[in-house]
Image: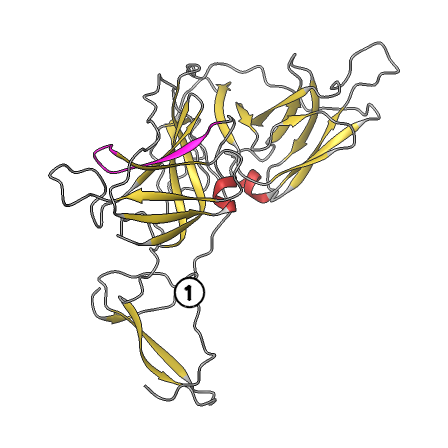
Amino acid sequence: MKNKFLSLIVLMLLSCFTFQNVTAQICDIPAPYEGNTGVNMTVMLLPTFVQSLPISGTSAYIVAKVESGMVVGSSEVNGADQTSLTLWGDDTFTEDVDGALTGEIISFELVDGSNLYAITPVFGVGSSSFVVNGIASAVNSTSSLLCSADSVVSEPSACDLPIEFSGNTGSNMTVMLTSPFISSLPISSQDAYLVAMTSDGLVVGSEVIAGLSQTAIAIWGDDTSTLEVDGAAANEPIGFQLVDGLDLYDVDMPSPISYTANDMVPQLAGATLVLNCSSSGEVVEGCTDASATNYNSGANLEDDSCEYVAVVPGCVLGTVYITEAHGKGDPEDYIEIYNSGDTDCSLLGFMLDDEQPFGDL
């Protein structure tokens, strides 16, 4: 609403990472951006944003696109704690449209090897709307697998559900399951549990996770004092599956696990999941992301229908400014901040400098 005084908005940024289950298809992988139109804006990709990305390869990069599909920027994100992404605007001195237009909404995709993900950033400052010389900061993200050139995911079938681990081999390692990890799982059963398995299908650990915000799972190693292989071998890769009632999901951990005795590895971000099978015999399509507003706990196959709470864009200096202030050390001192724009915006990330004395404006 135009010409209204701004309410201070505090955004609670949940460190969550969501998944989408899709039937994979051959990908049309966008190439990295090359060029310089002379007009740009900068998106800061903060550590929490980079950590939320489902990166598994060694040459992952993010591309930015306009609605027509034209790539207007890219940045490598593999191995980076934080980085920035330059979005290039249209060069108005030429007839061809070779960049983003002012106010145009930018979409983002992650190229991770032969996998292509749609990325929805959560902004602490700014938004996905292109602003010449603007600065935005991405603090988190959600993602959905668009396609994969590696394989094709089949329709769910009846499950051979792995049972929970029982035993103690005398040697183990610990995997910490933090709140962002657990909140990314599509848990609908009160008995849902996570299992750890070796490459030959041997269950070497399990943990009930339903109703918990964080926990840990012990991965048990082989007892070398016996002839029988009853645990993981040193440096053996460990896979994970989620048993949720009659549904079985393959879980791609944000930090891959190889067995190391007495080691501890935390999972600080969300997981990527694919529905392996469903013993219910019925495929129910719907939104399987528990963080979405239209989450369907009865769905076992993602249909890309998930909806999320809109993120309030960051304020722009000049559009938002102080119109009145009273600062004489009295309890009733105040400042009045005016928003001359057409929509609400967030002051998250802004600071007031009160080092210089001032009287009434």
Task: Determine whether 268 is above or below 258 in the image.
Answer: below
Can the viewer see residue 245? no
- Does residue 164 belong to the magenta stretch? no
Q: State the quadrant of the N terminus.
A: bottom left
Task: Determine whether 351 is above or below 298 in the image.
Answer: below
Q: State the quadrant of the C terminus.
A: bottom left
Which quarter of the figure has residue 245? top right
Stretch in magenta: 59-70
Q: Residues within 10 Å of mark 1 (few under 14, many from 20)?
A: few
Q: Nearer the viewer, residue 235 or 33?
A: 33
Which quarter of the figure has residue 24? top left
**Amino acid type at mark 1:** Phe
Apparent side of residue 122 relative to residue 173 in the rendered image (left or right): left
Q: Nearer the viewer, residue 185 or 126?
A: 126
In terms of secondary structure, where does tag 1 sit?
loop
Residue 263 position within the rendered picture, expressed as x and y whole percent measured from the top left? 75, 33
- Residue placed furthest toward the top: 227
Residue 339 position within the rendered picture, expressed as x and y whole percent measured from the top left? 27, 68
Can you identify the residue that label 1 sits on? 350
Residue 97 position within the rendered picture, expressed as x and y whole percent measured from the top left? 16, 38
Apparent side of residue 6 relative to residue 206 in the rendered image (left or right): left
